[in-house]
C-alpha cells in the first residue's frame, strides 16, 4: 500500500518536473527569438562599419549582387572607417557629448538623490501637493517645452556656439523630477537608522552620505547611469540648441548630419555606422563595470526583520 | 551625567491628535527613570522629544539646566538605544560603535581603546569585525548598547530595548542593564510596556495612559500605593482583582462586603481610611492575587467558589476561580504551601474552594473617579 502511494507521488512528481521542463524550454525559445530580433540591427551596424567603400544605405550586408557584373563593387572589409572618423569632426562631437553627459551625470545625480532623500525623510507643508504636481508635470512630453526653451536659451545666449552649457542647463534643470525610483528605495531604508545616526552626532548631510547612500548603492548606480545615458543619446534638444554650428554638435546630431543631405544620397553611411559603434563602447563598458552593484539585500541586519 | 527637567511638555500632531498632555517631571542626576504604559500612551513620544527626534509642541525640556527645545539631537549630548537596534548594516560592529566618535574626530587610538573596552563589558569582542547581519538578536542589541556607551553622554535613552528579544534573553539582558547602569553611573530614561522591566530597573516609574501621567513613584510606591485604578491594574502580574462592593463604616472600623462576606479592613489601611474621613458607600475593591488566600473550608467570611482554570507556573499556582454570583478572581498560591491533600483537590475539575482576603492589603477606589480613596490626590 505504502509503496503504491510512493510510486503515485513519484509519478506526480515526475509529471511536474517534465511539465516545468517543457514550459522552461518554450520560454527559452521565445526569449532566444526575441533577443535575435533585437540583436539584428546591432549586428548589421557593426558589419557595415567595417566595410571599406564609402556608400549610401544599401539593401545587402555581406555580398553586393551587382558585383557579378562589376568586380570593383565587391565588398571589402577593413578599418578605414574608424581611421577616417578621427580625421573628421567626429572627435570634437564625441568630446562635446562626453563633457555634457559627464557634467549632467554628476549634477543630476546629486540633485536627484538630495531631492529623493528630502521627500523620503522630511515632512513639510506642501510636500504631497508638490509630489503630485511633479507627477502631473511629468506626464507632459518634454518636447512640448521645446520652442519656449529655445527662445529662453537664445535670449541668454546659450545656443549655437554656446550650445554645450545650454544643453547642460536644459538636461539638469528638470532633473529633480526623476526622484520616484530613488525615493521609493530610500523609503525602504528604516528611518531609525537616520535617527540613530542623528543621535550619534551626524548632520542630515552626513546621514545621507555616510548611512543612506552606502546602503542605496544600486539606486545610486541606476541614477548615474540614467543621468549619463539621457544626454549621451539625445538628439532632439541637441539638434535645435546647436542649430547650424557643427562645432557644437553632439554625436547624435553630428552623425545624423552625415546622412541628412539635401539629395538623401550620402556617401558616409558606413562611417556613420562606425561612429555608432564607437558611441556604444563607453556605454557598454559602463554597464559592464557597474552591473555587479545591482545587488539586493544590502540592508540585511540593520533592524529586526 | 545630568538632570533632565520636563515642564508642561506637550505633543500635538498635525492632525490635532494630542499624544502627550502637560508632562511634568524632574529627573535627578544619575537617576534611572522608566516610562511605562500600554502602547499609544505617549511614552515613546516623550522620550523622542527628549532625544530631539520629535518636535516639542509646547513646554520645555531642559538637560542640565539648559533648555534644549530647539537643539538638534546631535547637540543634546544624549545616547539612545532603539527597539529595532538600528545598526548601520554596511559597517562592521567596530565601525558601528566607533561611528559617533569618528564624527567627533576623536583620535583613532582613543577610539580603539573605547570600542574595545565597551565590547569587553558587553562580551562582544569576538564579533567586532562582523557585520550586523551575522549577529543574533541579543548580540545586535549589545552592539546598539555599545554604540550608546562609548559616547559618554549626559543622558542615556532607551526605547523598549528588550522588546524584540525572546523571553529568556530578555531576562538576561535586563540583569545586564542593571549591571551596565552601575558601571556607567549616568542618567537613564527607559521606555517599556513591560511592567516587570519597569519594576526591576527603575528608581522611579512614570506610569502613563493616553498621554497623561497616571503616577510617578518608586516601584514599591506604585505597587503598594497605586493612586488610581489604572496603575493598580497595570502594575503587578497577574493583575489586581477588582470588584464592585460596599464599604461599611461601623464606628472607627471599616468592613467590605464582597460576595456576601463581611471582612474587616485591618492594619494601617483602616486607620488611613478613618483619617481621610471616608464614609460608607459603594467602592471598587482591589485585591492582588497574592493577597487572596485559600481557606480550609466553609466558615464565616469564607467565600465559596469554583475552580475554572489552573495555571501551573512552577513555583506558584494561578487559580482562576468563579464565585456563586459570577465574579471571577485570580488567586496566586505558592506551590510550596500546598500539602498533598490540597494538591489532589486542585486536580479535580470544578473543585470547590473557599477564599478570603488579607484585610491589610486591600485597595479602595472611587467607582466614579477611579482614584484611590487613600492615596489618590
Image (cartoon, coloured by chain):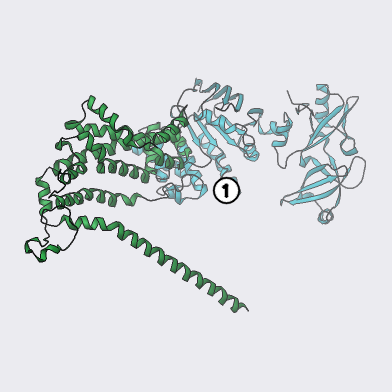
Chain colours: A green, B cyan
Residue A288 picture location, percent across and down:
28, 52
Q: In the rendered view, does B212 fall on the left or right side of B72?
A: right
Foreground: B355 or B29?
A: B355
Dot 1 alpha-carbon crowd within 10 angstroms: few under 14, some 14 to 19, many 20 or more: some
Q: In the rendered view, does A249 fall on the left or right side of B356?
A: left
Residue A52 picture location, percent across and down:
11, 56
Q: Is residue A52 above or below residue B53?
A: below
Residue A75 picture location, percent across and down:
12, 61
Foreground: A278 or A256?
A: A256
Foreground: B206 or B16?
A: B16
Tell me if residue B200 can be seen. yes
Residue B66 picture location, percent across and down:
49, 20
Q: Chain of mark 1?
A: B
- Which quadrant of the figure has residue A154? top left
Tell me if residue A200 can be seen. no
Local secondary structure at mark 1 = helix
| Residue placed under numbered mark 1 in the picture | B169
What residue lies at 25% left-to-right and 44% top-to-bottom?
Answer: A233
What residue lies at 71% left-to-right and 50% top-to-bottom?
Answer: B313
Q: Is residue B104 above or below residue B330?
A: above
Q: Is residue B284 above or below residue A85?
A: above
Q: In the rendered view, does A117 fall on the left or right side of B340?
A: left
Q: How many marks?
A: 1
Quarter of the image with the C terminus of chain B is top right
Amino acid at each position: 500500500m505504502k509503496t503504491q502511494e510512493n510510486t503515485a507521488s513519484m509519478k506526480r512528481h515526475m509529471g511536474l518536473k517534465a511539465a516545468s521542463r517543457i514550459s522552461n524550454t518554450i520560454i527559452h525559445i521565445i526569449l532566444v527569438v526575441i533577443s535575435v530580433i533585437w540583436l539584428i540591427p546591432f549586428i548589421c551596424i557593426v558589419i557595415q562599419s567595417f566595410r571599406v567603400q564609402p556608400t549610401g544605405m544599401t539593401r545587402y550586408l555581406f555580398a553586393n549582387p551587382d558585383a557579378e557584373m562589376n568586380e570593383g563593387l565587391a565588398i571589402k572589409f577593413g578599418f578605414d572607417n574608424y581611421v577616417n572618423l578621427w580625421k573628421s569632426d567626429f572627435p570634437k562631437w564625441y568630446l562635446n557629448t562626453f563633457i555634457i553627459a559627464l557634467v549632467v551625470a554628476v549634477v543630476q545625480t546629486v540633485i536627484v538623490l538630495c531631492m529623493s532623500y528630502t521627500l523620503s525623510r522630511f515632512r513639510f507643508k506642501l510636500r504631497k501637493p508638490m509630489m503630485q504636481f511633479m507627477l502631473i508635470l511629468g506626464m507632459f512630453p518634454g518636447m512640448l517645452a521645446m520652442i519656449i526653451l529655445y527662445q529662453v536659451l537664445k535670449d541668454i545666449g546659450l545656443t549655437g556656439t554656446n550650445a554645450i552649457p545650454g544643453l547642460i542647463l536644459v538636461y539638469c534643470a528638470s532633473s529633480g523630477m526623476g526622484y520616484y525610483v530613488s525615493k521609493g528605495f530610500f523609503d525602504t531604508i528604516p528611518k531609525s537608522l537616520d535617527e540613530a545616526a542623528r543621535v550619534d552626532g551626524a548632520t542630515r548631510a552626513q546621514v545621507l552620505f555616510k548611512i543612506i547612500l552606502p546602503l542605496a548603492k544600486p539606486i545610486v548606480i541606476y541614477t548615474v547611469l540614467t543621468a549619463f545615458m539621457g544626454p549621451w543619446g539625445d538628439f532632439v534638444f541637441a539638434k535645435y540648441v546647436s542649430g547650424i554650428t557643427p562645432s557644437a554638435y553632439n554625436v547624435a546630431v553630428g552623425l545624423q548630419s552625415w546622412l541628412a543631405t539635401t539629395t538623401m544620397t550620402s556617401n558616409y553611411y558606413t562611417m556613420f555606422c562606425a561612429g555608432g559603434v564607437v558611441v556604444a563602447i563607453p556605454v557598454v563598458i559602463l554597464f559592464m563595470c557597474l552591473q555587479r552593484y545591482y545587488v539586493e539585500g544590502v540592508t540585511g541586519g540593520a533592524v529586526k526583520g | 551625567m545630568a538632570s533632565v527637567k520636563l515642564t508642561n511638555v506637550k505633543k500635538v500632531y498635525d492632525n490635532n491628535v494630542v499624544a502627550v498632555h502637560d508632562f511634568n517631571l524632574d529627573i535627578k542626576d544619575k537617576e534611572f527613570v522608566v516610562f511605562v504604559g500600554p502602547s499609544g500612551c505617549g511614552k515613546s513620544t516623550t522620550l523622542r522629544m527628549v532625544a530631539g527626534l520629535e518636535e516639542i509642541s509646547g513646554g520645555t525640556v531642559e538637560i542640565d539646566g539648559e533648555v534644549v527645545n530647539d537643539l538638534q539631537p546631535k547637540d543634546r549630548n544624549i545616547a539612545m538605544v532603539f527597539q529595532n537596534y538600528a545598526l548601520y548594516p554596511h559597517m562592521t560592529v567596530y565601525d558601528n560603535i566607533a561611528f559617533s566618535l569618528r564624527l567627533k574626530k576623536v583620535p583613532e587610538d582613543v577610539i580603539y581603546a573605547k570600542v574595545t573596552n565597551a565590547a569587553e563589558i558587553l562580551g562582544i569582542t569576538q564579533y567586532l569585525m562582523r557585520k550586523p547581519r551575522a549577529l543574533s538578536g541579543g548580540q545586535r542589541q549589545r552592539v546598539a548598547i555599545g554604540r550608546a556607551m562609548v559616547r559618554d553622554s549626559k543622558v542615556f535613552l532607551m526605547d523598549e530595548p528588550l522588546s524584540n528579544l525572546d523571553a529568556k534573553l530578555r531576562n538576561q539582558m535586563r540583569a545586564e542593564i542593571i549591571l551596565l547602569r552601575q558601571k556607567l553611573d549616568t542618567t537613564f530614561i527607559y521606555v517599556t510596556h513591560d511592567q516587570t522591566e519597569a519594576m526591576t530597573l527603575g528608581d522611579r516609574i512614570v506610569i502613563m495612559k493616553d498621554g497623561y501621567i497616571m503616577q510617578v513613584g518608586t516601584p514599591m510606591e506604585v505597587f503598594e500605593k497605586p493612586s488610581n485604578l489604572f496603575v493598580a491594574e497595570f502594575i503587578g502580574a497577574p493583575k489586581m482583582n477588582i470588584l464592585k462592593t460596599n464599604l461599611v463604616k461601623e464606628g472607627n472600623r471599616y468592613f467590605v462586603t464582597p460576595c456576601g462576606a463581611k471582612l474587616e479592613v485591618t492594619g494601617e489601611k483602616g486607620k488611613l481610611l478613618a483619617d481621610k474621613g471616608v464614609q460608607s458607600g459603594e467602592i471598587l475593591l482591589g485585591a492582588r492575587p497574592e493577597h487572596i488566600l485559600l481557606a480550609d473550608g466553609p466558615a464565616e467570611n469564607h467565600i465559596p467558589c469554583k475552580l475554572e482554570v489552573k495555571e501551573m507556573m512552577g513555583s506558584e499556582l494561578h487559580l482562576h476561580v468563579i464565585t456563586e454570583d459570577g465574579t471571577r478572581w485570580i488567586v496566586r498560591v505558592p506551590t510550596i504551601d500546598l500539602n498533598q491533600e490540597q494538591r489532589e483537590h486542585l486536580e479535580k475539575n470544578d473543585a470547590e474552594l473557599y477564599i478570603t482576603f488579607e484585610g491589610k492589603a486591600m485597595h479602595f477606589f472611587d467607582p466614579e473617579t477611579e482614584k484611590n480613596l487613600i492615596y489618590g490626590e
